[in-house]
Amino acid sequence: MSRTLSARTSRYVRACATSVRGSRMQDVPQAPPDPILGVTEAFRKDDSADKLNLGVGAYRTEEGKPMVLRVVRKAEQQMLEKNLNKEYLPIQGLADFCNCTVELLLGNNSKAVQEKRVSTVQSLSGTGSLRVGAAFIEKFLPGTTIYLSDPTWGNHKNIFADAGLEWKTYRYFDPKTIGLDFAGMMEDIQSAPDGSVIVLHGCAHNPTGIDPTMEQWTQIADLVEKKGHLPFFDVAYQGFATGDLDKDAAAPRFFEERGIEFMCAQSYSKNLGLYAERVGALNLVLNSSEAATRSLSQLKRIARAIYSNPPVHGASIVAEVMSSPEMFGEWKAEMQEMSGRIMQVRSYLFEELKKRMPEKDWSFVVNQIGMFSFTGLSPAQVENMTNKWHVYMTKDGRISLAGLSISKCGYLADAIVDSFKNH
């Protein structure tokens, strides 16, 4: 009997010891806050009446409220009346969406589309599209290095690294001029090994808001073609940068006309305000219809393993809007309203900054385009912006003008000038 009790006691002790040791995941380190979404988390904890959240690139009305486009509400009402089902989409996504998104990117006269040289899969906004593209590169272009602009969107490095790809940077921003370091950019692309993947922002470069001119895009295309590089366009702001869908697609369309193969991720988070719907696409624009067919089969296989098939609601909204000339026109008008308000905010902020610090050249505020302004503020100055002025922004000095109201331009100018002068 005593032996039986002893055995039971021993098992109990071992069980307790296992319990004391804790989880098998005990040694998993705490991840740092996301450099962009973490800003919003910090903002929500601040109870100051003056606080401003200029971190996340999400459009707000002049009253600081999230905005659902009127044309989106209209499309959803029409979809409701159609009594659509909730069946799985094909792995490639909603066919009408895929057709519409390629036409939006390349135009309705694209030879690549007419000759069936484009592989398109609907994916989870821009992030998911980039991630599927990264997996494709890792699998079929092994050993290829990814070149990202310095600086670039905060999630680019994570996306490519998590796919097992090595990334490096090419020069892009010149802190002395707060403009494009075009010479440095070209030198680094020239120095990259032949056949590298060059990630290019199609318009409204994030975070700088500085885009190459069409003359510079021509030189970039010449160099990419000479080196045999594969461009990977990230088009997150088409129509939202300038208010003109065609103008904002000029760079990828130019590359297509030149016969340069490229990949392109698209997002409808910004231009249709579908942030929560996670709707986007990955396109491979190739020089062979056979290669496009085979590539599509592999993109579908990759998507199947990651998320199986994409969500239907956001894609249906896009297809509904773009298939109706009337609604498409309404969408373009609303995009112009949004981009126009941001341009107005830029002008107001520029004037307020000039009043407070006329000796400094603030022209970069109005010369940059898109949602963001890259201020040139140092990390210490950004810390002052947050700790003293309750202005929340990314540590690289980027502010989202899409989240700024005209009434707050003076307050933001006070914060920026104080940070430049005293830190």
Image: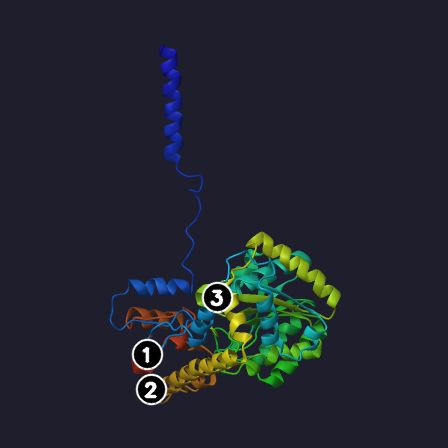
Amino acid found under the numbered disc labelled 1: Leu
Comparing 290 with 38, the one in front is 290
Tell me what residue is drawn at x 66 percent, y 77 percent.
255
Name the residue beneath numbered marker 1: 412
The first of marks 1 and 3 along the sequence is 3
Q: How far apart are the alpha carbons under marks 2 and 3?
A: 29 Å
For this view, does 57 lie left or right of residue 256?
left
Disc 3: CA contacts within 10 A as few (<14), some (14-19) or many (>=20): some
Amino acid found under the numbered disc labelled 3: Gly
The first of marks 1 and 2 along the sequence is 2
Comparing 248 with 102, the one in front is 102
Amino acid found under the numbered disc labelled 2: Glu
Tell me what residue is drawn at x 59 percent, y 72 percent.
100
User: Residue 103's spot in the image, x, y percent?
Assistant: 61, 75
Residue 232, above or below 410 = above
- The quarter of the image holding the C terminus is bottom left
Name the residue beneath numbered marker 3: 154
Residue 333, above or below 29 = below
Disc 2: CA contacts within 10 A as few (<14), some (14-19) or many (>=20): some
The image quadrant of residue 281 is: bottom right
